[in-house]
Image: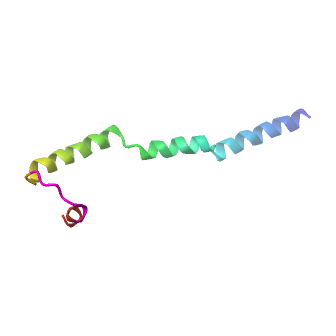
Amino acid sequence: MPTDKNLIATESADIETEHPTSNEQSQSRREKEVPSEKQATEALKVIRELQSSVFTKGRKFIREEMNER
């Protein structure tokens, strides 16, 4: 019977490595979705550049107008 237990243990280990748990999948997905510090810094840089070059005179635009621009 020890061989059977070893076989079962080996098979279980193989299954775990081939098929990640839902928790591992969720963690992996979150890591991909969360922007990196570098991405956030670059996005803020672009926003600041736009703020310095686009003048609206304080006027708020509606969604349709923003889509046109």
Q: Which residues are magenta?
A: 58-64
Q: Residue at x 20, y 67 (%)?
A: 68
In the rendered image, which quarter is residue 5 located in? top right
Q: Is residue 67 above or below residue 39?
A: below
Left/right of residue 51 with respect to residue 63 in the rendered view: left
Q: Position of residue 10 (x, y in %)?
A: 76, 39
Q: Residue at x 82, y 39 (%)?
A: 7
Left/right of residue 55 with respect to residue 38 in the rendered view: left
**Furthest-top residue in view?**
2
Give the quarter of the figure containing the N terminus: top right
Q: Position of residue 29 (x, y in %)?
A: 50, 46
Overall secondary structure of the magenta stretch?
A: loop
Q: Position of residue 21 (x, y in %)?
A: 63, 43
Based on the picture, tell me whether residue 5 belongs to the magenta stretch: no
Colouring mode (rainbow / by chain / secondary structure / one colour): rainbow
Left/right of residue 46 with respect to residue 19 in the rendered view: left
Q: Position of residue 54 (x, y in %)?
A: 11, 53
Based on the picture, tell me whether residue 60 belongs to the magenta stretch: yes
Q: Nearer the viewer, residue 56 or 18?
A: 56
Give the quarter of the figure containing the C terminus: bottom left
Q: Is residue 3 above or below residue 50?
A: above
